[in-house]
Image (cartoon, rainbow, N blue to C red):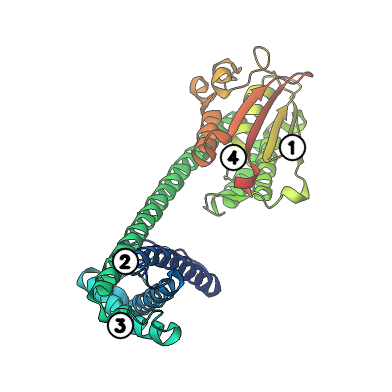
Amino acid sequence: MSAPADTTSTRTPAGTGSSSMTSVLRSLLRHYLHVLALCCVVSVFTTLMWPTRSYLVQLGYATCIGTLCWITMEAGRYLVDPRNCHGNPEGGRGWPKGWRGLVLTVIGILVGFYVGDEAAYWLIGPGDSDAGPANKNIIGLYITVAAGAIGSFYFHAKGRSAAMAAEIAATARDATEARLKLLETQLEPHMLFNTLANLRVLIATDPERAVAMLDRLNDYLRATLGGSRSTLHPLSQEFERLADYLALMAVRMGPRLRCALDLPPELRAVPVPPLLLQPLVENAIRHGLEPQVEGGEIRVLARREGGDLVIDVIDTGAGLDAGPVSTLEEQEPRRPVHTSPGSDSSTQGGFGLTQVRERLRTLYGEDGTLALSSPSGGGTCATVTLPFSAAA
């Protein structure tokens, strides 16, 4: 009636010693409650077989036997070399592999039956003088063996299922992180190629500004590429990257580019994917502000709406070709495209937007969205929405 741990190897979650011990204790308590439930069921059958003994007496015997079986098997796991045990996703020592697990099950059943039955006899008494102690009845041993085998198989299968689920989840997380890294590495050279194309123009027309822009690019790349490569980082770092990028673009555009970043203090620590907003700002500059002689303004605003984190990237540029739209798929082909020498603008208009959409979908599923719309005053608003509970 023991509760073996899982029977397949898996990754043990990292954590502190106290949290690991808490996890082990919770697992033991949960398993013991299952053992007690099985004892209640066994007591029903033994009461039907020996009606001269009350159900409470039968339950007392079953509890003593089941508890001794459980203690023996749980303690026995820690006497086996860890190298000969399966991994345990719930923490602690896993169930012994192969014949070791079978031997431990047999020992646990025998100890539980003989010692547990004797303990129950001394604690509870025979219950009925005609019934006799259960350890003298071979049927009682058969019942204990059957109950122990059923309980062990149940926990064996339950642990195996949990281990496989943990392994699948870990593999899925690895695949998601790899996909996000791929999308991020595709975004970085995309931005760099666009900036180098602009530098090429400035070198011929304004060498001093080209040098200043090159210095800014160097600082931006040092800060960006030297940063964390984690899947998520604080929203404050994302805004810092935006500030660096806008400073880089300001060298080229001068007073034609005006910007404002609004990040409430309570949202600074909210985790978001790196380079989530930079493609939207780049798209707003290239396709919204640059086509206008007077340039324009970009505002990036973060706020919380109910259970969602909402970030708006608003520009006062050329705007959309038509009225408001609700989905990225409808809008991408209609965004005005500005051509810069040395760049292939025919394919760049939707690249950054598509990457943002794919990263949101990979991380948050249908709950992560990107929508484009036309504000009443003109320009374009790109709105990123993701679940705040997942972000926080």
Lower sequence index among marks 3 and 4: 3
Please tell me which residue lies in front, 209 or 379: 379
The answer to which quarter of the image holds residue 75 is: bottom left
C-alpha gap between disc 3 and disc 2:
20 Å
Lower sequence index among marks 2 and 4: 2
Q: Are marks 3 and 1 in contact (CB under 8 Å)?
A: no
- Mark 4 lies on residue: 276
Frontmost of labels 2 and 4 is: 2
Residue depicted at x 36% and y 70%: 2
Lower sequence index among marks 1 and 4: 4
Visible in this render: residue 196? no
- Mark 2 lies on residue: 49
How crowded pointer 1 is (Cα within 10 Å; few <14, some 14-19, many 20+) is rated as some
Judge from the rendering whether residue 24 lies leftward or rightward of residue 305; answer left or right. left
C-alpha gap between disc 2 and disc 1:
74 Å
Residue depicted at x 68% and y 21%: 373
Please tell me which residue lies in front, 279 or 17: 17
Please tell me which residue lies in front, 139 or 181: 139
Frontmost of labels 3 and 1 is: 3
- Mark 1 lies on residue: 301
In the rendered structure, which amino acid carries the disc numbered 1? Leu
Visible in this render: residue 276? yes
C-alpha gap between disc 3 and disc 1:
72 Å
Q: List x then y, in percent, for residue 132.
A: 32, 81
Q: Secondary structure at mark 1?
A: strand
Lower sequence index among marks 3 and 2: 2
In the rendered structure, which amino acid carries the disc numbered 2? Met
Numbered badge on residue 359: none
Judge from the rendering whether residue 35 lies leftward or rightward of residue 308; answer left or right. left
